[in-house]
Image (tube, grey):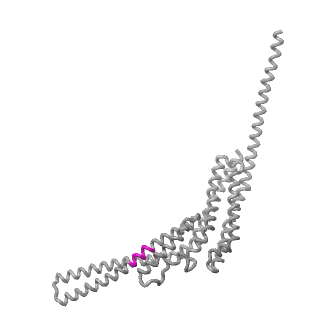
Amino acid sequence: MTTTVNSGKRPTKFVLIVGIIVVILLVALAAVAVTNVNRQQDRESLAQIKKEQLTSLLDAKNKLPGALDEYFAAFKKSYLVDYSLEQAEQEAKPERDAFEKAEASARSAMAKLKSSRGAGQDEVRDAIAQYEDSYLGFVDYTAGLIDSYPLYTSLWGTDASPCQGIFIGDRGANLSERDELLIKAVDTCRAATGKLAKSKNSTLAEYAQRIDNRLSQLKTDSATTAEAEQKLGKFTVQYKQFQKRYDQAIAANASEKKLLALADEISQINDEISANKTAFDFASRRYLSTVEEMPPLLGDVFEKHVPAEIKYFGSVIELRSDVLEKVLADAAVE
């Protein structure tokens, strides 16, 4: 009887144990299945990033330079008619709107890439972060360029432009008056270049700083030449007085000691005049050279510096795009 009861319980326990094992196996298999599905979806997403989204990003980026050029052309065409910034900005509004639309598309494409499935994986995330740094750096660069272009254009455009006054020309009766005119002109110019120095575009901000450095040099050299001119007048008077005293001493048969003392004074004045002339010549030559540098500095902004920066961004973005593609390819097969 006992044997019958005991043998009846063992199958029940056995069935329960087997049932638990089966459940565990099913859960494990389900987890594996879910993991495999997720992994497959990650692979598909990474492949999509590599094939489609990177292409979309580069297409969006490549539209920005053309949109910039169209805005610049429209702005300049209007500005050269009557040199009105307000009118030029209004006339170029369609082109600016087109740029801003292209800018928004580029930023949106970058945001979509970052939010893609699989983009949070360690190596993929790091590669995307590096790519984003260069990509959005370029977008910010072009956006800053278009924002600050009107201010940049207005610095020198007309006689009434804030920096045009530093070209004194033949104004002023003497160097002291010219120095006073320059000081006023420099203050006006600096107020405008100070605003440009805050531009989000590094090239225009650096240009503003270069102009400010030249303005400082102009003020220094202008003050030196004005002071040298004033000293020269005083030296000339002193020299004539000493020469007159020397001639009088000769006529009066003055002692050799007195004549030598007068000669020493005249020699000292000659040395001071020579030193003053040297300072004047150096400052005046540098002043002229600084003034002559202004037009090339302006022209180099869009002839050299902006194209060089755009080329630099393009090369870095291309490099980081290649790196990201490789990382995506490696992550998709792991």
- Magenta-colored segment: predominant secondary structure: helix
Instruction: Look at the image and give the residue range highlighted in magenta.
Output: 218-226
Question: Residue 122: horizontal and vertical position, in percent?
Answer: 64, 46
Res 58 seen here: no
The answer to whether residue 141 is left or right of residue 13 is: left
Question: Residue 273: horizontal and vertical position, in percent?
Answer: 32, 80
Q: In this view, does 98 lie above or below 8?
A: below
Q: In this view, does 109 lie above or below 1?
A: below
Q: What residue sits 45% from the left and 76% below the top?
A: 287
Whether residue 220 appears in magenta in the rendering, the answer is yes
**Picture quadrant where residue 133 is located:** bottom right
Query: Which of 328/260 is in front?
Result: 260
Question: Residue 35: horizontal and vertical position, in percent?
Answer: 74, 40
The answer to whether residue 64 is left or right of residue 277 is: right
Q: In this view, does 197 lie above or below 173?
A: above
Q: Quadrant of the N terminus?
A: top right
Query: Which of 316/233 is in front?
Result: 233
Q: Is residue 70 above or below residue 137?
A: below
